[in-house]
Amino acid sequence: MTDLPPFPASVMAGLRNSEERLRLALTAAAMGTFVWRIGEDRSELDAQMLALLGRPASDAIVANAPLAALIHPADRQRFADAVARALAAGPGGEVREDVRIQLAGGATRWLAVTAQIYFEGEPRRAARMVGAAADITERKKAEAVLRESEERARVALEAGRMGTWRYDLASGAQQWDLRQYALLGLDPGVKPDRAVFLSLVHPDDLELVAFDAAGLPPPGSFLDSEFRIVRADGETRWIAAHALARYDEDGKPVEMIGVNLDVTETKRAVEALRDSEERLHVLVGELQHRTRNLIGVIRAIADRTLRSSGALEDFKAKFQERLAALGRVQGLLSRIKDNERVTFDELLASELAAQTGSGGDRGRIVLDGPKGVRLRTGTVQTFAMALHELTTNAVKYGAFKQPHGRLRVSWRCELGERGKPWLHVDWKESGVAMPAERAQGGGQGRELIEQALPYQFGARTCFALEEDGVHCTIALPISESRAEGAGHE
Amino acid sequence: MSEAALRDRRILLVEDEFLLAQNLSDEFQAIGASVLGPAASLERALALIEQERAIDVAVLDLNLGGVMAYPVADALLARHIPFVFTTGYEDASIRPRYPAARTCEKPFAFSALAKALADALAA
C-alpha cells in the first residue's frame, strides 16, 4: 500500500463506507477473501478465509506451499492449472473453481473460489490475485444426493427396460424417452404422437389403453394396464403401463405421465406354467382313469385265476405272478414322459428277463427285430399281459421247460390299412415235445391273444399248438407319433 | 331288487377293456339279462345302436381307448334309450352336456351298476 499516492479524505471516507458494505456482504454470505502477492510468495487471508480453511490467526500471512498443501490432492493440479490459465490470459484473467480443502482431523470442505489477476507496471506483469471463497459443502452434498437419486432412477428404468412418457392433456403433445421408442420398436426420429402409439396397439387391446377425462386416476393413484403391441417388424410384445395424472392447483388435470415396461417374458413364463398345469391336469385325469380301470382288471384276473385254479396254493402262485406282470408294465408306463412311448423290445425284454432271469435260458432265445418300435400307450397293458402268459407257458410247459426247447421272437413294422403302422410279431417255440393233452396252461394267454387283443385294438392274432411248440402271431396297430429327434423310419 | 328288474332285459354294453367287458357280460348273464355287444369302440357301439331293434338300457364307458363316448350317448338319447355312464374319473364335461346322466364311478360293485341301470329303466 505504501506505493499508492494519498487520497483526499472524502474519497477515503467513501472508500471506507464501501469497504464496510462489502465486508458486511461477505460476512453475511460467509465468504472469505484473500490476496496472493504473486512476486513475493505470500498470501494474505482475512479472518473469514482463515475460518474457512480451519487455520489459526498466525496464518494470516502465509507462503504459497503451505497454502497449496491445504487443497485436496485430487483437486490441487486442477486448481493450479486454472490459475496458470488465468495468468496466461492476461488482464481480466479469472479463476472459477470448486475445490476441496483438507481440514485438520481428515474432514474436507468444498469451497467455491472466484479470483481475478491484477496486472501492474511496464511492461505489464501479474502482480496479485484477489479472490473470495464460499463454503459450498452443503450444496455439493445435496448435488451428490440428487445425482445419486437420479442415477438410481435411471438404473431402475434401464434395468426394468422401462420407457417413460408424458402426455399434455391440453395440447395433446407427447414426450417419449429413448427407451420408450425402443419399447415401441420406433426410430427416435418419429414424432411422438398418441395416434402413432395407438396404431401399434393390438386391435383387441385398444379398449385397454383408452382413457378419457372422466376416467383419469385421482391424485396419488396409478392407472395400470396391460396390453399387446405389434411392432413394425411384426413382433408382438406385452406392455405393462403405469400412469398417473397431474392436476393444477384448481384440481384440473394437466398431464399424464407414466412408465411402460415390456413384460413379454413374464407373460410367456406364466403361459408356459399354465400350459404345464393343464398338461398335468390331463395326466392326473389319465392316471386316475388308468388306476380305476386297473382295479377292475385285477378283479377280473382274480376271478379268472380262481376259476382255473385247483387249490388255493395254485391260485396264490398264479395270481401273484400275474400281479407282478401288471406291476412291471405299470412301471414301464409310469416312466414315460410326454412324447415317449413304451417300445416293443423293452416290453418283451422286461417280461423275458422277469421270468427267465439271466441264466442258461438266455441261450435258448433268439430275438430278431428292430429296436424302438413305439407302442400305443393304451395297448401296452393288455399286450404285456398277453406276452406274460406266453412266457409263463413257455417256462412251465414249453421252450424253457424242455431241454431242447428254443424260442425265436421276430418282429417287423408295416404300413397297414389306411397307411397306419402295424407291428407284426411272430412267437415261435421249437424243440418242444408237445404233450398229448394239455390239462392246463394257455387258457388265459389264449383268451388274451385270441379275444382281448382283437376286441380292444382290432389286432389280428393266431395261436396254434404246432408239432414242436407254440406258434403265435400278433399284428396290432402301433403309435403313429415319432420319437423326438428321430428321422424317417 | 334291482337285479330282478334287469332280468330278460337287453343291455347294450360299451366297454373297451376286454376283461371288464367279459366280467360284466358274465354278471349280466348270471342274472338273466342278455348282453348286446360288448363294443370296444365308438364305431362298433354306434353300429349296434343302428342294428339292434330293441335295446332296453345301456352301459357306456365314457373313455373308449382315449376317445370320449359322447356320440354314443347322443345316439342313445336320440332313441330315448336310458343309459349309465361308467367313468374312471370325475369328468366336468358330463354335467353340462348330460344334466340328467347317471354315472357309476369305477371301480364299482356289480350291484351298484345294476341299481343304477334299474333306476334308469324306472325313470
Image (tube, coloured by chain):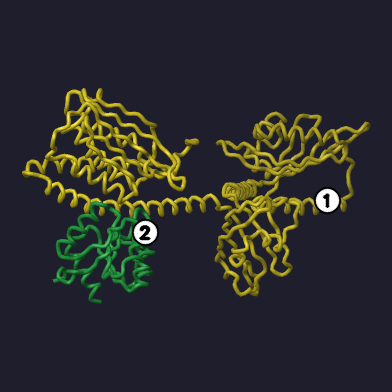
What chain does badge 1 belong to?
A
Q: Nearer the viewer, residue A236 or A446?
A: A446
User: Which mark identifies residue A186?
Assistant: none
Q: Nearer the viewer, residue B99 or A263?
A: B99
Q: Residue at x 43, y 47 (%)?
A: A417
Colour representing chain B? green
Which amino acid, mark 2?
Leu
Colour representing chain A? yellow
Q: Residue at x 38, y 58 (%)?
A: B43
- Residue at image mark 2: B42
Q: Nearer the viewer, residue B60 or A25?
A: B60
Q: Is residue A206 above or below residue A283?
A: below
Residue B47 lies, in percent from the top left, at 36, 62
Which amino acid, mark 1?
Leu
Circles 2, 1 touching at the beta carbon (< 8 Å): no
Where, quadrant-wise, is the C terminus of chain B in this rendering? Answer: bottom left
Residue A410 lies, in percent from the top left, at 34, 32
- Residue at image mark 1: A15
Q: Residues within 10 Å of mark 1 (few under 14, many from 20)?
A: few
Q: Residues within 10 Å of mark 2 (few under 14, many from 20)?
A: many
Q: Are marks 2 and 1 on the same chain?
A: no
Q: CA distance from mark 2 to mark 1?
A: 117 Å
